[in-house]
């Protein structure tokens, strides 16, 4: 009386599932990494933060060039001396430290840590974007690349490669199962 061996253990059939498994694993890793790369750009917005990239050295060494600053909206009256705020000046968003909050006039006096003197113009309350809650060095440069048109195309192609590898794995499995 001979026992029939399960299909996966038959001699000569060993190793046929390795290529689909590798395609599936690599494809899944690519898709997961594409999602993880997008998280720093999307998650803060969901949590109520605005994210900006620091492009000048006015706040160095505290906040280096290329950092991502996470700004949370706040009431101007709650801003205290020493807080770092983000405010709009024309088309730019500037991140400087508050030297004084002039509540009666509705303005801030600000200064960049690396600058010798206070900023020439006071910042009206209406220009306040919010208080800088945290910053991450170098993340701003990465986010700038990822959120550019070319960065989005690359990320989309990368994710498409992961999806295609998963599709290839399922086709290879179907082909193998069809032959057996």
Image (tube, rainbow, N blue to C red):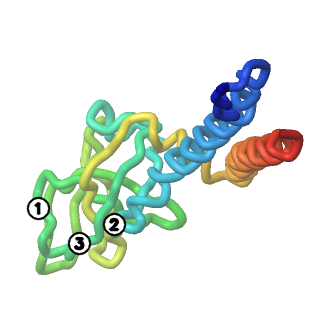
Residue at image location 75% in from the left, 47% down from the top = 170
Q: Residues within 10 Å of mark 3 (few under 14, many from 20)?
A: some
Residue at image location 72% in from the left, 54% down from the top = 149
* Quadrant of the drawing holding the C terminus: top right
The answer to whether the residues at label 1 and label 3 have Cβ atoms under 8 Å apart is: no
* Relative height, residue 176 to residue 69 (above, below): above
Query: Is residue 138 left or right of 61 when viewed as pictured?
Result: right
- Lower position in the chain sequence, tag 1 or tag 2: 2
Describe the element under mark 3 as helix, strand or loop. loop
Q: Which residue is mark 2?
A: 47
Describe the element under mark 1 as helix, strand or loop. loop
Front-most of 176 and 133?
176
Question: Can residue 157 be seen in the rendering of this structure?
Answer: no
Query: Is residue 133 left or right of 126 when viewed as pictured?
Result: left
Picture quadrant of residue 12: top right
Give how far across and how far down residue 130 sits, in percent: 29, 66
Q: Residues within 10 Å of mark 2 (few under 14, many from 20)?
A: few
- Lower position in the chain sequence, tag 1 or tag 3: 3
- Looking at the image, which residue sits at the far front? 1
Q: Which residue is mark 1?
A: 80
Question: Can residue 89 be seen in the rendering of this structure?
Answer: yes
Give how far across and how far down residue 49 sits, in percent: 35, 64
Q: Give the alpha-carbon distance from disc 1 to disc 3, as whole Å.
A: 11 Å
Q: Which residue is mark 3?
A: 74
Front-most of 104 and 134?
134
């Amino acid at each position: 009386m001979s026992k029939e061996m399960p299909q996966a253990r038959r001699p000569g059939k060993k190793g046929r599932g390795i290529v689909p498994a590798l395609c599936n694993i690599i494809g899944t890793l690519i898709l997961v990494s594409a999602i993880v790369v997008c998280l720093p750009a999307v998650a803060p917005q969901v949590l109520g933060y605005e994210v900006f990239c620091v492009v000048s050295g006015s706040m160095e060494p505290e906040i280096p060039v290329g950092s991502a600053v996470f700004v949370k909206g706040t009431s101007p009256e709650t801003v205290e001396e020493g807080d770092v705020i983000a405010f709009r000046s024309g088309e730019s968003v500037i991140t400087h430290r508050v030297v004084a909050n002039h509540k009666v006039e509705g303005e801030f006096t600000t200064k960049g840590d690396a600058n010798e003197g206070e900023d020439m113009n006071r910042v009206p309350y209406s220009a306040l974007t919010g208080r800088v809650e945290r910053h991450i060095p170098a993340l701003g440069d990465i986010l700038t690349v990822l959120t550019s048109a070319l960065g989005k195309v690359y990320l989309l192609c990368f994710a498409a490669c992961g999806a295609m590898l998963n599709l290839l794995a399922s086709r290879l499995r179907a082909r193998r199962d069809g032959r057996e």
